Amino acid sequence: MRVAQFINKHMIKLLMGIIVLGLLVGYLLPGVGKQLQPFYPVALFIMLYPMMVGIKVGEVAGAAKRVGFMTVVMIMNYFISPLLAALLAHVFLAGYPDFAVGLILTGVVPCAGMIVAWTAMAKGNAPMTLVITVTSFLAGIVLIPLWMSALAGKYVPVDAWQMMKTILYTIVIPLILGNLTRVWLVKKWGPKYSWLK
């Protein structure tokens, strides 16, 4: 718990330090990035698991029932954002097609697993973020290739199995283990961890 408290207290400084370290290593040893890529899901799991301890499965199920809110988010993610990215690419990057395609791809891909961690750190609605992330990942399997073909003239295949594994490793498993950890903490330490109930 002391380690968790230290990380929580100095989260921003630690993140900035890790980002700077990553940039330095990437600049000085560019080949290391590809070698470390298989460890990405592990690192993401380590970041997300502590956040999941405070999220209840029932809260996630409740968030999934907010159909109106989810509809608005999906319209933003998969309609407004891609069109806005394409407009910006057309206006500012017309002479740089590679950068234009990159900007459009950024607008088409709505979110990543770390969004849950950022939301939790900002004291936002983490259960809703989980639902949005999973829904976006699943919709992205079909919509990302369609939008990239329509807006950038490039077919970008999405590995559906890899997307499913990402959901499993970064959402489902950390959520289950986080809930089991919360139950264990409450049983072992009692009222001290009553906020986790």
Image (tube, rainbow, N blue to C red):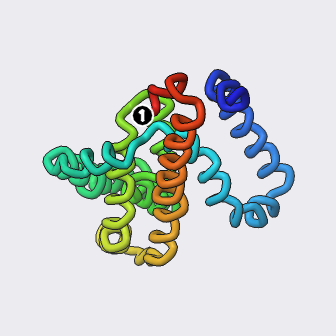
Q: Residue at x 60, y 52 (%)?
A: 44
Res. 87 in view? no
The residue closer to the viewer here, 128 or 108, is 128
Res. 120 in view? yes
Judged from this view, the residue extending furthest toward the right is 28
| Image quadrant occupied by the C terminus | top left
| Image quadrant occupied by the N terminus | top right
Residue 64 in the image, given as x and y percentages of width and height: 25, 51
The residue closer to the viewer here, 55 or 149, is 55
Using the image, determine if residue 54 lies above or below residue 67: above
Q: Residue at x 52, y 47 (%)?
A: 178
Using the image, determine if residue 7 lies above or below residue 160: above
Q: Residue at x 62, y 27 (%)?
A: 8
Q: Quadrant of residue 10?
A: top right
Task: Sort mark 1 into few (<14), some (14-19) or many (20+) by Cα contacts within 10 Å.
Answer: some
Q: In the visual, does 38 lie left or right of 72? A: right
Using the image, determine if residue 19 lies above or below residue 41: above
The residue closer to the viewer here, 101 or 5, is 5
Q: Secondary structure at mark 1?
A: loop
Q: Specify the amino acid type for callout 1.
A: Lys
Residue 181 in the image, given as x and y percentages of width and height: 55, 45
Reading the image, the residue beneath label 1 is 197
